Amino acid sequence: MLTEAEYAVLYEALQTKNLTLLNTPAQYAHCHYLPNCYAEIEAFTPKSIWMSKREAWDLDEIVAEVQAFGPKAAIVKDYVKSRKHEWHEACFIPSTNDADAVRRVVSNFIERQGDDLQGGLIFREFIPLLPAGTHPRSGMPLTQEWRSLVQDGKVIEAAPYWDVQCYCESPPMQKCEAVLANVKSRFFSCDVAQAADGNWWIIELGDAQVAGLPPTTKPEAFFWQVTERVSHE
């Protein structure tokens, strides 16, 4: 995944060769960094707060900031990625009122991300989602998450995020399009999942040019579809 600055360099270099990426640098950054697109999806995504990157992190300040969640569980990530495969050590905070747990998980995350930490820290309220087992290698809890790919406001692909057999229900992507139409990107990914109470949540947006395709998606057929849509402009 490219940083915003790296993407801008690539975009300009390709322009000199009469090649134009689907997303401008501003559109790339809009979905690549959660704080940039949070306003567009705020009512449909877990509550989130963030702190911009700094030279030294004050864990006491972080403990105070996450009190905004009350006694709820949360996850920590940077502006782009989490360490979800280190679920208990560097991702999941069982209660944001537990100062020791906050310090332990956050310090592990910061240390393990190292120079790869992008943008800053984000804390997101943990929503219990329909389960789909555990990851066979990391033991991370899996949920019935779907990855959709959106081009010019239309969902052109939606498939299970995980290669497991226990998915119960397809997401209402046509309803989602009304929300996703406000996202300032031509081509992006949108991960959605159903909570235990039946509500659907937007888990994450991302730039589709750097997003992994769902395991059941045929890459050649998918990218031909993208190309066909562009060729008819």
Image: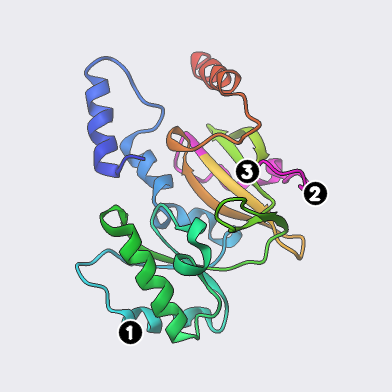
Callout 3: SS = loop
Q: Is residue 139 magenta?
A: no
Callout 2: SS = loop
Q: Looking at numbered disc 2 in the image, what kind of residue is underneath it?
A: Cys
The label number, if any, that marks residue 216 in the structure image = none
Q: Indicate the position of residue 36 as horizontal and vertical percent values.
A: 39, 53
Q: Name which of mark 1 and mark 3 comes first in the sequence.
A: 1
Residue farthest along the left direction in this orientation: 55
Residue farthest along the right direction in this orientation: 168
Q: Looking at numbered disc 1 in the image, what kind of residue is underneath it?
A: Asp
Q: Are marks 1 and 3 in contact (CB under 8 Å)?
A: no
What distance separates the C-alpha of mark 1 from that of mark 3? 36 Å
Residue 78 can be seen, yes or no: yes
What distance separates the C-alpha of mark 2 from that of mark 3? 13 Å
Q: Residue at x 73, y 45 (%)?
A: 172
The label number, if any, that marks residue 60 in the structure image = 1
Callout 1: SS = helix
Q: Looking at numbered disc 3 in the image, what kind of residue is underneath it?
A: Tyr
Q: Is residue 219 left or right of residue 114?
A: right
Q: Quadrant of residue 54?
A: bottom left
Mark 3 highlights which residue?
Answer: 161
Q: Indicate the position of residue 230 as horizontal and vertical percent values.
A: 49, 19
Q: Name which of mark 2 and mark 3 comes first in the sequence.
A: 3
Q: Is residue 85 above or below residue 216?
A: below
Q: Residue at x 44, y 85 (%)?
A: 99
Q: Is residue 136 above or below residue 123?
A: above
- In the image, the segment drawn in magenta is 163-188
Q: Indicate the position of residue 137 as horizontal and vertical percent values.
A: 57, 51
